[in-house]
Amino acid sequence: MAEDNGTGNKVDNIHGQPRKLPYQFIKDITNDFDEAQIVGRGAYGTVYKGTRENGEEIAVKVLQNMTGFDNKEFENLRRLKHQNVVELLGFCNESEKVVAEYNGKQVIAEKMHTALCFEYVCNGSLAEYISGN
Ligand SMILES: Nc1ncnc2c1ncn2[C@@H]1O[C@H](COP(=O)(O)OP(=O)(O)OP(=O)(O)O)[C@@H](O)[C@H]1O
């Protein structure tokens, strides 16, 4: 089923090879990165629970201070498929022009939106599981 996120970006089946996802799509499924959707925080950013129109849940890891996915870790993750490893469904790497202040002047700046989307695992973290919380 295709999902129209209101910008003309149709997002079909997201399973298979990890694919590039529009920023508008991850914004929509996380209710504009609503605090109530936060499921955790890691060293690289905040993880949100996103819900697609068809009810499918997705973990959206919004990465901070990243400009792209040219590192080895991402390439490995992209190829990895294993029953014990959460599946990478897609990634977002989109720039947006924003007005920012620089040296007291208003300038047009390019803001990068980078995120990784994984299958959602609903049993909490391993630490919580082991400690029985
Ligand atoms: N696929 C997922 N499904 C559900 N919750 C997740 C998922 N991925 C991460 N989380 C939640 O978000 C928290 C932070 O995850 P994240 O991967 O960002 O940090 P991390 O495990 O400390 O690794 P990193 O070193 O990459 O920061 C996890 O502890 C977990 O609670």
Image: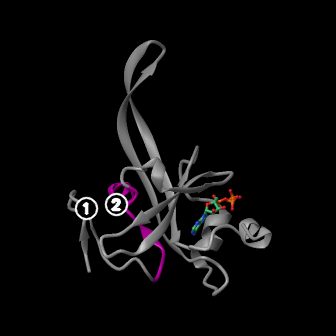
Vertically, is 14 above or below 62? below
Q: Quadrant of residue 29?
A: bottom left
The residue shown at (63%, 68%) is: 124
Question: CB of mark 2 within 8 Å of CB of mark 1?
Answer: yes
Q: Which of 26 and 22 is in front in this view?
A: 26
Vertically, is 109 above or below 123? above
What's the magenta region? Answer: 16-30
On whether ligand 1 comes within 8 Å of the CB at mark 2, the answer is: no
Q: How is the image coloured?
A: one colour
Residue 129: numbered disc:
none
| Extreme-front residue of the structure | 133
Q: Return the residue at label 1.
A: 5
Q: Quadrant of residue 81?
A: bottom right
Residue 25: numbered disc:
2
Left or right of residue 59, residue 26 in this image: left
Q: Nearer the viewer, residue 131 or 53?
A: 131
